[in-house]
Amino acid sequence: MKKIIFLFLLLPAVIFSQELAATVVVSFEQLDNASKERLANFQQDVENYLNSARYTDKVWEGERIPCQFNIFFTGSSKEINYSAQMVVSSQRPIYKSKSSSLMMRVQDKNWQFIYERNQALYFNQSSFDPLTSLLDFYAYLILGFDADSFEKYGGSPYFAKAYEIAVLGASSRFSDGWSAIGASFSKRGLVEDIANAKYEKFRKNYFDYHYNGLDIIKENNELAVSNLVKLVDDIYENYEKMTRSVLLRVFFEAKAGEIIDNFGKLAEKDVFEKLKIIDPAHITKYNEVLDAK
């Protein structure tokens, strides 16, 4: 497996128990001083939790997955109730390159949870906790997208875990952020898309885009471009069935810039004409590529 070979080339004797190398950044600007004081240890508590939890039942080989959790507090009440927004992103190395691929970048605008100063955070998959379960949800998404890029449907076990958390969240008293379908992003909508059979081909193409595309682009750019074309063509042909897809929005939010940077000079014009249709949010960027051709 290319991932294992690549990571062993870098760190031949390193095996980690944990899967994530998480960095947590917290903003308290909208809170009063008393709330800020009560949250003095929050950043370190969350970072320690993410980096010490084990999300798989297997030995993790190679480097941990670098990921970032940027948390912006928006309100507090009764000294223990908080609301926040969070931006989560993760990367994966590109084979034989010093560059990384942005795998996901999502903004979750609806997070309510309970936190007490010096509260111990425990990993518990059998019950829902509005604080740790959201962290776990995104941890499983990070693992799922990473695994899907190295093996066809390799992320399925992790996506299934994320789906279970979404179901528990929707039936909890903190259901607002889990059950509602948002205009820009929906946690439940994302995992339901991933599990839907109509996205099975997209996930296969997702694997080829990374493993037989980005990873080999310097050695075989013709094959790499053909796999990008396959992904774009398949989305284009089925776009009417996917116009409200949360999965596609998440994909292009991470990949639009990457596609332009790596394939802008290699792919034909029609690829970017189709991208303008299936990813209208980044139409300006695609027009810039077309204007330069």
Image: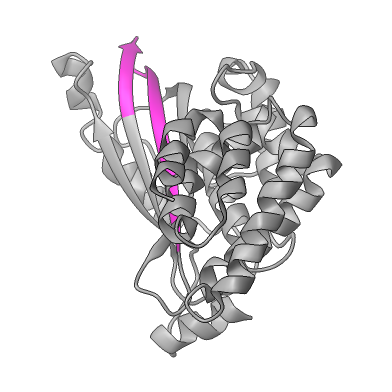
Picture coordinates of residue 183, whole percent (x, y) = 57, 16
Viewer-nearest residue: 100 or 166: 100
Residue 240: % across, % down: 77, 28
The residue under the point 64% across, 44% down is 125
In the figure, is residue 127 to the left or right of 14?
A: right
Q: Is residue 73 left or right of residue 211?
A: left
Question: How many numbered badges does the structure rendering display?
Answer: 0
Give the residue at the far left of this rendering. 33
| Magenta residues, dominant SS class | strand
Residue 183 within the magenta-colored segment of the rendering: no
Q: Is residue 88 magenta?
A: yes
Depth check: give the residue in front, 196 or 47. 196
75 relative position to 214: left or right: left
Residue 148 visible in the snapshot: no
- Taking depth in this image into account, of 271 and 3 the one nearest to the observer is 271
Closer to us: 72 or 5? 5
Q: Position of residue 248 (x, y in %)?
A: 63, 38
Relative to 143, say whether 288 is above or below.
above
Eyeballing the image, is 172 above or below 128? above
Q: Locate residue 176: give its quadrant.
A: top right
The colour scheme used here is one colour
Q: Residue at x 69, y 68 (%)?
A: 151
Q: Which residue is painted at 44% across and 66% down in the image?
A: 64
Image height of 234 relative to 107, above or below? below
Direction right: furthest residue: 197
Horizontal and vertical percent position of residue 142: 54, 51
From this viewpoint, is residue 198 visible? Answer: yes
Q: Quadrant of the N terminus?
A: bottom right
Region of the chain picked out in magenta, as a range: 72-92
Residue lying at 67% horizontally and 29% vertically, measured from the top left:
188
